[in-house]
């Protein structure tokens, strides 16, 4: 390799090495990566390790500053927590009704609920959007929370756990004057914490990863 004398070049060009007028190496200082196509077959820019490392992390900095990602994270955490808490509350009440209370059409209503699980969420995308627009909830937290606080799977999961609780506990609570509401939150829910926590985790992760509004 021979070292060429630089006569006219941009200020970032430091050294040019060539061999048999075919292989050319171009060394620059503080210059962006370039690819020479016109005058020489190839070009190469050498960076120090610190420069490469700085460029890698600078991409993340530029991406973070390019959009309000901090606001996005706050929205995601808020929506995930609220939907999870509300779903567990409503699912626990519905599961208690389907497992311990007696009313007309209980099994039919429960089977109807289960049948809705066979409908893909994508099918409901347009109808849900039309409904939300009728309520003027577009671009609001209501649209991200209200449609997703009811989960048939969570109702099914918690109901199956509630059914394992002996009915004698329910009978004893009624004899002692306990209301259905008190028995649910002081007896049934504490005894069913594994199922409830499982439903809560599934809901939180699903809400966190919900890139599609279904």
Image (tube, rainbow, N blue to C red):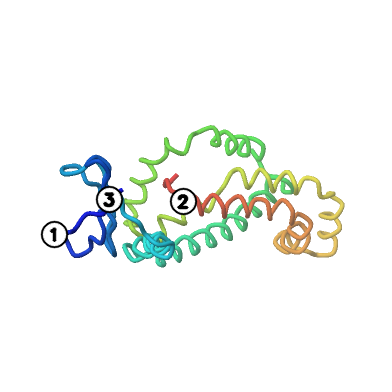
Q: Which residue was labeled with disc 3?
A: 2
Residue in the picture at 31% in, 62% down = 66
Question: In the drawing, does residue 199 fall left or right of residue 82?
Answer: right
Q: Are marks 2 and 3 in contact (CB under 8 Å)?
A: no
| Residue topped by disc 2 | 147
Horizontal relation, residue 182 to residue 7: left or right:
right
Residue at position x 31%, y 48% in the image: 1
Q: Which mark is residue 202?
A: none
Front position among marks 2 and 1:
1
Mark-to-mark CA distance, 2 and 1? 70 Å
Q: Determine which quarter of the picture holds residue 107.
A: top right
- Measured as percent of width and height from the top left, residue 144 is found at 43, 55
Distance in Å between CA atoms under marks 2 and 3: 72 Å
Work out which quarter of the rendered image holds the C terminus and state it.
top left
Residue at horizontal 56 percent and vertical 59 percent from the top: 86
Which numbered disc flags the more N-terminal residue, 2 or 1? 1
| Residue 143 picture location, percent across and down | 40, 55
Name above or below for residue 59 compared with residue 150.
Answer: below
Indicate which disc, 2 or 3, sits on the residue closer to the N terminus.
3
Q: Nearer the viewer, residue 166 or 144?
A: 144
Q: Position of residue 17 (x, y in %)?
A: 27, 51
Which callout, 2 or 3, points to the residue nearer the camera? 3
From the viewer's perspective, is 173 left or right of 131?
right
Please report contact status of discs 2 and 1: CB closer than 8 Å, yes or no.
no
Q: Quadrant of residue 23?
A: top left
Q: Which mark is residue 7?
A: 1
Graded by Cα atoms within 10 Å as few (under 14), some (14 to 19) or many (20 or more), the crowding at tag 2 reads some
Question: In the drawing, does residue 207 fall left or right of residue 141?
Answer: right
Mark found first going from the N terminus, 3 or 1? 3
User: Mark 1: which secondary structure?
Assistant: loop
- Judge depth for marks 3 and 1 and give the one in front: 3
């Amino acid at each position: 390799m021979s070292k060429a004398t630089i006569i006219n070049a941009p200020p970032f060009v430091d050294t040019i090495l060539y061999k048999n007028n075919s292989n050319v190496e171009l060394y620059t200082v503080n210059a962006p990566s370039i690819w020479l196509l016109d005058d020489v077959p190839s070009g190469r820019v050498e960076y120090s390790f610190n420069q490469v490392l700085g460029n890698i992390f600078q991409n993340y900095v530029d991406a973070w500053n390019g959009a309000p990602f901090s606001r996005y994270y706050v929205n995601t955490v808020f929506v995930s927590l609220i939907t999870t808490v509300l779903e567990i509350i409503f699912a626990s009440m519905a599961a208690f009704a389907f497992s311990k209370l007696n009313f007309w059409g209980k099994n039919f209503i429960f089977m109807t609920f289960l049948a809705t699980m066979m409908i893909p969420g994508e099918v409901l995308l347009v109808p849900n959007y039309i409904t939300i627009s009728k309520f003027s909830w577009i671009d609001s937290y209501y649209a991200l929370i209200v449609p997703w606080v009811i989960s048939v799977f969570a109702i099914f999961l918690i109901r199956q756990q509630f059914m394992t609780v002996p009915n004698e506990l329910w009978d004893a609570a009624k004899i002692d004057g306990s209301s259905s509401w008190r028995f649910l939150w002081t007896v049934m829910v504490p005894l069913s914490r594994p199922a409830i926590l499982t439903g809560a985790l599934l809901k939180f992760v699903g809400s966190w990863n919900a890139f599609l509004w279904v």
